[in-house]
Amino acid sequence: MTTAPAFDLDAVRAVPGEDLLTPDNAMMLFVDHQPQMFFGAGSADRAGVINATLGLAKAARVFDVPVVLSTVAAESFSGPLLPGLREVFPKHDIVDRTSMNAWEDQALVDAVKATGRRKIILSGLWTEVCLVLPALSALAQGYEVYVVADASAGVSPAAHEHAMQRMTAAGAVPVTWLQVLLELQRDWARGGTYAATLDVVKEHAGGYAMGVVYAQSMIDPHAAG
């Protein structure tokens, strides 16, 4: 019988774990948030998926997280990138593809590699095709993949859930857009992004947003305007 090593309380420090998402170690990949793909999305309320996608995009903007935008057959079938997403990143290039698996497009892979980040925060439509395929491919090449479940959708609840399970089993980490935003902020003493983070919360976080507005109005009636 072996004895477990003693736990060194003196070694415990208040430092972030390497597994946490930070503005310096992550990038975001948005895949196929396009009209034709939304037409077929049936796993969640489309307005909710759009809201989550825009909240996630604004989180990237607040924390200056590198972003890669991608579409599939934009001019021949699927239509343009979600307008609100384009408004958040008006100057970003968009990688348009023919492949359902975004990771089979060299321009997209090169764009991800150019960020120098190994943690990919991934969202897209549909979960069971255009999301699961690049997730599995990126995982196989050593990337860490964080799948934003509520900024993604499949053709049915079962399709979305089974794809999420498949990615999770392969090593991907399921997250939500609000979780990503708050993980990037992580400390309300970080004044440089405090106000901008709360602005995103108030625009996209539903009941939490109302709580923030209420709290601000109780503390300072002028802050809620």
Image (spheres, helix red, strand yellow):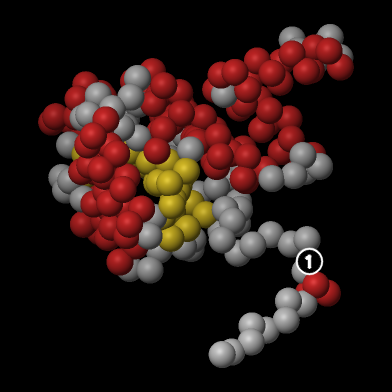
Residue 154, position as x, y percentages in the image: 25, 33
Q: Nearer the viewer, residue 6 or 113?
A: 6
Image quadrant where one finds the C terminus: top right
Residue 69, position as x, y percentages in the image: 37, 42
Residue at 62% x, 45% y is 183
Q: In the image, what residue type sits under mark 1?
A: Arg
Residue 86, position as x, y percentages in the image: 41, 29
Q: Nearer the viewer, residue 105 or 7?
A: 7
The residue labelled by disc 1 is 13
Residue 113 seen in the figure:
no
Residue at 71% x, 38% y is 193
**With 205 as the anchor, is 109 left or right in this view?**
left
Dot 1 falls on a residue whose secondary structure is: loop
Q: Residue furthest bottom?
A: 1
Relative vertical location of residue 218 with respect to residue 75 in this rendering, above or below: above
Residue 167 seen in the figure:
yes
Residue at 71% x, 20% y is 212
Relative vertical location of residue 209 with respect to residue 125 in this rendering, above or below: above
Image quadrant where one finds the N terminus: bottom right
**With 108 as the anchor, is 172 left or right in this view?**
right
Q: Nearer the viewer, residue 97 or 157?
A: 157
**With 207 as the anchor, is 34 left or right in this view?**
left
How many numbered circles are shown? 1
Residue at 63% x, 20% y is 209
Write down the quadrant of residue 194 in the picture: top right
